[in-house]
Amino acid sequence: MENNNIYLVRPTLKLKDKALKYRQEHFDNGENIINGSELFDKADTYEEWLQAVTENASPETVSSNWVLTDTFFAVEEQEEIVGMIDLRHTLNDFLINLGNCGYSVRPSMRNKGYATEMLRQILKVAKKAGMNELYLSVERTNIPSIKTIKKNGGIYARSFEFEGEKADIYKITLL
């Protein structure tokens, strides 16, 4: 089922409670890593995390050990957060196997087309930012994410191993 009734919004203080509930649902589901969250899963406070993602979204304030990154919540009409997605404008040595984009969908909202729509929308953001291609990494066991990437034009580029797990990099050319 496809779902186009979502839109991407930048994190704000107003979304704090909904964001913390989103994060908690991942933790309650046994997921300690939230892809595409720019370390929201590791943040001590929402406010510290918000400041970091806000600074990293601007060329003037991006952290010297990071890259220019746009982070978004995917929200539906009632402003419930259904997912998170980020867009890294460049790849440094650390990010080369992580790719330009990561995303996650709230455990209770999976298999409804949200990830596919989130990625479709971030491709427009990337194109508007002057990017010509995106690289996305995915563990070979993550079949839903592989399908999401392929639905958005992803083509296998190469493989690598990370922490003993085989993973692949897909390339999406922005037209």
Image (spheres, rainbow, N blue to C red):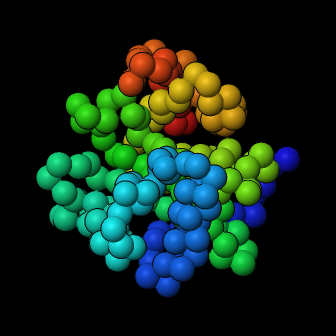
Q: Is residue 40 visible?
A: yes
Which residue occupies 43% across, 57% down? 41
Q: Position of residue 158 (x, y in %)?
A: 45, 15
Q: How many marks?
A: 0
Query: Where on the picture, by quarter, is residue 150?
Result: top right
Q: In the current view of this chain or complex, which residue is farthest to the left?
A: 64
In the current view of this chain or complex, which residue is farthest to the right?
1
Quadrant containing the C terminus is top right
Q: Can I make out residue 122 in this image?
A: no
- Which residue is pictured at 30% across the width and 72% down the height? 48
Q: Is residue 139 left or right of residue 47?
A: right
Name the residue: 61% across, 25% down.
141
Residue nearest the observer in this picture, 162 or 86: 162
Residue 45 rendering spot, x and y as whole percentages: 35, 73
Q: Residue at x 46, y 43 (%)?
A: 101
**Vertical order, 21 against 157 (above or below):** below
Q: Position of residue 95 (x, y in %)?
A: 31, 35
Residue toward you, 168 or 48: 48
Q: Position of residue 106 (x, y in %)?
A: 65, 57
